[in-house]
């Protein structure tokens, strides 16, 4: 069954090639297609394009289909082209010609646009929650180990004193910044394209403000041509936000692998979070962090993949956009999985509290001594030279007491301020508006705009 089918059959190889992985990808979108249809037909009833009494049975059956999606029982049958066709077919089987009316005033183009927006905003909500969970673990570890010193490095050379409070807290603050990108992606996503039809609007008197309210969108994509042009652009910009989070995770994973190695021994991963070797019985490999690093490095290429697929397309719809779904839709699960694994291991990671017992780290206190001398009145350049000569002569004896008090330093982590940054950004999403709107729509029996 194809919504566009007329009185001829398309070549089977052409059909296979053009459908591609659409039926597989559409399973990601199924319940969101149902939500979009519920809002659309509620609006159709409001403007008189559904007959008296038709809305309640249509909504009831769509709720049944939505429940099947939630249970994982929704399938796109053999011979059915896509999720839109499957939903319409299921309605028609149950309700007859009434089921065919749900397509009035829309195209598969704006159907898939609204499906993608509803799917993406839901996955952004989940990602924001997973980012916050990892953030919380990092700040907890930062506070727990804020007094434990460790070497800081530049050029992979021992540089200056750092601390586990700083190391864990740095990645927490990085995630607070990444949340700003997710918020920008959310705001672009949470705009209603429904009613743009094939990209040029409809002669029906559609009430787009009504569907915007029903679906809990902040506002709409106003210009119908832009609504269609926004396909691909939304995915690319959301992918940039995801890539920003992935960049933080990849860097943290590299640090964890390095610090876990015997040459560093700064941290120890829980045994149950490591893997072994088939030949070397002593091995405890940090495979989880290695896979997080690899998966997140791959995710950082996602914006470029999407850009190259949509690059230089003129306005209007083109089938090229179908391919974006194949790289975009599964990416949320990959990133969310990495975030959850990272939070799990970070919560259980053990830190070495005796790193600085090893004298190879003594030189990192040289700056502390230079600053102590300068504070006592010795010109900085003279103090620098004196300490440098002591190090060369092997007579430098470090004072391992670190007195850093300014904002953001070892002794003044500002973790409370970092948490305020994260909380302020999260509160501006207003996820509750979306949740409440979807619940109202799913519980509606039909009738006036609620």
Image: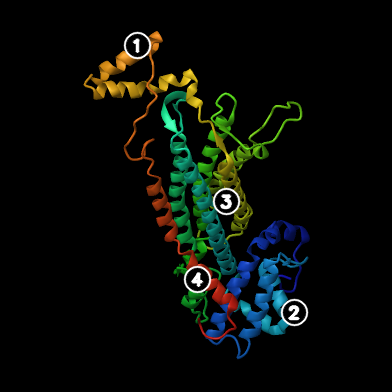
Tell me what residue is drawn at x 48 percent, y 59 percent. 186
Which secondary structure lies at badge 2?
Answer: helix
Tell me what residue is drawn at x 66 percent, y 70 percent. 84
Tell me what residue is drawn at x 49 percent, y 79 percent. 207
Is tag 3's residue or tag 4's residue first in the polypeptide sequence?
4
Q: Distance between the Cα atoms at labels 3 and 1?
A: 59 Å
Q: Position of residue 389 (x, y in %)?
A: 34, 11
Q: Which residue, given by chain and number where applicable, does mark 2 sit on? A: 93
Is tag 1's residue or tag 4's residue first in the polypeptide sequence?
4
Q: Residues within 10 Å of mark 3 (few under 14, many from 20)?
A: some
Tell me what residue is drawn at x 55 percent, y 72 percent. 438
Which secondary structure lies at badge 4?
Answer: loop
Q: Is residue 30 visible?
A: yes
Total marks placed: 4
Q: Nearer the viewer, mark 4 or mark 2?
A: 4
Is tag 2's residue or tag 3's residue first in the polypeptide sequence?
2
Q: Position of residue 194 (x, y in %)?
A: 53, 71
Instruction: Give the numbered dot on residue 216.
Output: 4
Is tag 1's residue or tag 2's residue first in the polypeptide sequence?
2
Q: Distance between the Cα atoms at labels 1 and 4?
A: 68 Å
Q: Nearer the viewer, mark 1 or mark 2?
A: 1
132 lies above or below 152? below
Q: Which residue, given by chain and number where applicable, does mark 1 sit on? A: 389
Q: Which residue, given by chain and number where applicable, does mark 3 sit on? A: 309
Q: Distance between the Cα atoms at labels 4 and 2?
A: 30 Å
Q: Nearer the viewer, mark 3 or mark 4?
A: 4
């Amino acid at each position: 069954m194809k919504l566009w089918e007329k009185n001829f059959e398309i070549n089977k190889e052409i059909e296979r090639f053009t459908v591609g992985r659409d039926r597989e990808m559409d399973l990601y979108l199924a319940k969101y297609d149902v939500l979009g249809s519920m809002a659309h037909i509620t609006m159709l009833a409001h403007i008189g394009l559904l007959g008296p009494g038709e809305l309640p049975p249509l909504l009831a059956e769509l709720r049944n289909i939505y429940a099947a999606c939630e249970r994982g029982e929704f399938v796109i049958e053999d011979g059915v082209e896509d999720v839109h066709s499957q939903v319409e077919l299921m309605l028609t089987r149950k309700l007859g010609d009434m089921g065919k009316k749900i397509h009035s005033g829309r195209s598969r183009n704006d159907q898939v646009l609204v499906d993608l927006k509803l799917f993406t905003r839901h996955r952004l909500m989940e990602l924001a929650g997973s980012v916050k969970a990892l953030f919380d673990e990092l700040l907890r570890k930062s506070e727990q180990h804020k007094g434990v010193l460790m070497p800081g490095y530049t050029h992979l050379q021992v540089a200056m004193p750092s601390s586990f409070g700083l190391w864990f807290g740095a990645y927490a603050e990085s995630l607070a910044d990444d949340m700003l990108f997710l918020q920008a992606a959310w705001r672009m996503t949470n705009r209603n394209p429904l009613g743009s039809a094939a990209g040029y609007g409809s002669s029906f008197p559609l009430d787009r403000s009504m569907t915007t309210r029903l679906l809990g969108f902040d506002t709409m994509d106003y210009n119908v041509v832009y609504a269609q042009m926004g396909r691909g652009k939304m995915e690319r910009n959301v992918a940039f936000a995801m890539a920003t989070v992935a960049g933080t995770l990849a860097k943290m994973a590299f640090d964890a692998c390095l610090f876990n190695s015997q040459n560093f021994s700064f941290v120890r991963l829980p045994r149950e979070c490591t893997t072994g070797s088939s030949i070397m019985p002593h091995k405890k490999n940090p495979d989880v962090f290695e896979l997080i690093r690899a998966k997140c490095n791959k995710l950082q290429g996602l914006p470029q993949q999407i850009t190259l697929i949509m690059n230089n397309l003129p306005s209007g719809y083109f089938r090229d956009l179908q391919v974006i779904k194949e790289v975009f839709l599964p990416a949320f699960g990959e990133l969310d999985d990495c975030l959850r694994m990272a939070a799990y291991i970070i919560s259980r990671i053990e830190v070495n509290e005796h790193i600085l017992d090893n004298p190879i780290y003594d030189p990192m206190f040289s700056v502390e001594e230079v600053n102590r001398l300068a504070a006592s009145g010795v010109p900085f350049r003279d103090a620098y030279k004196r300490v440098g000569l002591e190090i060369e002569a092997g007579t430098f004896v470090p004072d391992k007491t670190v007195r850093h008090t300014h904002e953001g330093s070892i002794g003044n982590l500002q973790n409370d301020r970092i948490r305020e940054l994260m909380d302020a950004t999260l509160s501006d999403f207003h996820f509750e508006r979306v949740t409440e709107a979807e619940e109202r729509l799913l519980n509606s029996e039909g009738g006036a705009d609620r």
